[in-house]
Amino acid sequence: MTAIGVQAQRLWSHRTPRRSFFEAFIRTLIIMCAALAVVLSSVSICDGHWLVAEDSLFGLWHFCTSTNQSGLHCLRDLSQAQVPGLAVGMGLARSMGTLAVVAAIFGLELLMVSQVCEDVRSRHKWAAGSVLLLVAFVLSSGGLLTFVILLRNQATLIGFTLMFWCEFTASFLFFLNAISGLHINTITQPWGRPGKF
């Protein structure tokens, strides 16, 4: 009987503990919010039209002017916008925005894999995914800041388009989910040893 009791105790000690409903809910919420941020940022970068100033529309990919006769006329050559350094600056802004989306996609993938395949390294995958979301926040906010600095003379609060605010919201969500993801890893017990949340 003693041998059976010892074997049962060993099996119980090697068993991975179940996470609480609250922890699973918070982690699922972080994943969903991160996915929403990726979608918002992707749509915003692809559209790229972020600022309306008088009869001009400034974007990451195009510069457009509006006239009564010909309507909206868009140019890919941003140097014709008569704004110093716009072509180089927009190249930097869209590169940072695009890299932010790529980093966020890889981070989101690590977050999901850590929840689907629970093993000893799951918490490390979750932490790595959260760090990638933090990198996405830095890149995304850098792109936004570059855009605003380049067009500070033309920018007004009501001139920013819905796509700009989508990118702003995505950047905020990247930061919020990254910090939340790192924090929940520090306040919960490791999944490889017994403990309660």
Image: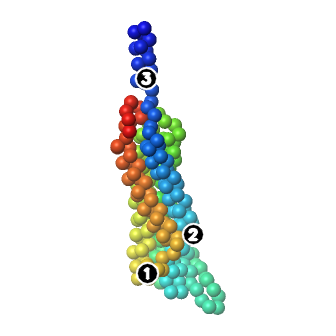
Residue named by callout 1: 156
Sequence-wise, the earlier of marks 1 and 2 is 2
Residue under the image location 46 percent in, 41 percent down: 21
The crowding category of the residue bearing disc 2, from other C-alpha atoms within 10 Å (few below 14, some 14 to 19, many at least 20), is: some
Residue 105, horizontal then vertical, whole percent: 51, 53
Q: How far apart are marks 3 and 1 (CA)?
A: 63 Å
Residue 60 makes an appearance in the image: no
Scheme by which the image is coloured: rainbow
Circle 1 or circle 2, nearest the eye: 1
Circle 2 or circle 3, nearest the eye: 3
The crowding category of the residue bearing disc 1, from other C-alpha atoms within 10 Å (few below 14, some 14 to 19, many at least 20), is: few
Residue 128, horizontal then vertical, whole percent: 42, 46
Numbered disc 1: secondary structure:
loop
Residue 47 is tagged as 2
Q: Distance between the residues labelled 1 and 2?
A: 20 Å
Residue under the image location 38 percent in, 43 percent down: 185
As drawn, which residue projects farthest toward the right?
70
Amino acid bearing label 3? Trp
The answer to whether the residues at label 1 and label 2 have Cβ atoms under 8 Å apart is no
Image quarter where the N terminus lies is top left
Q: Distance between the residues labelled 2 and 3?
A: 55 Å
Residue 48, horizontal then vertical, whole percent: 54, 70
Amino acid bearing label 1? Thr
Q: How many labels does the image show?
A: 3
Numbered disc 3: secondary structure:
helix
- Name above or below for residue 175 compared with residue 8: below
Front-most of 124 and 69?
A: 124
Residue named by callout 3: 12
Sequence-wise, the earlier of marks 3 and 1 is 3
Front-most of 71 and 16?
A: 16
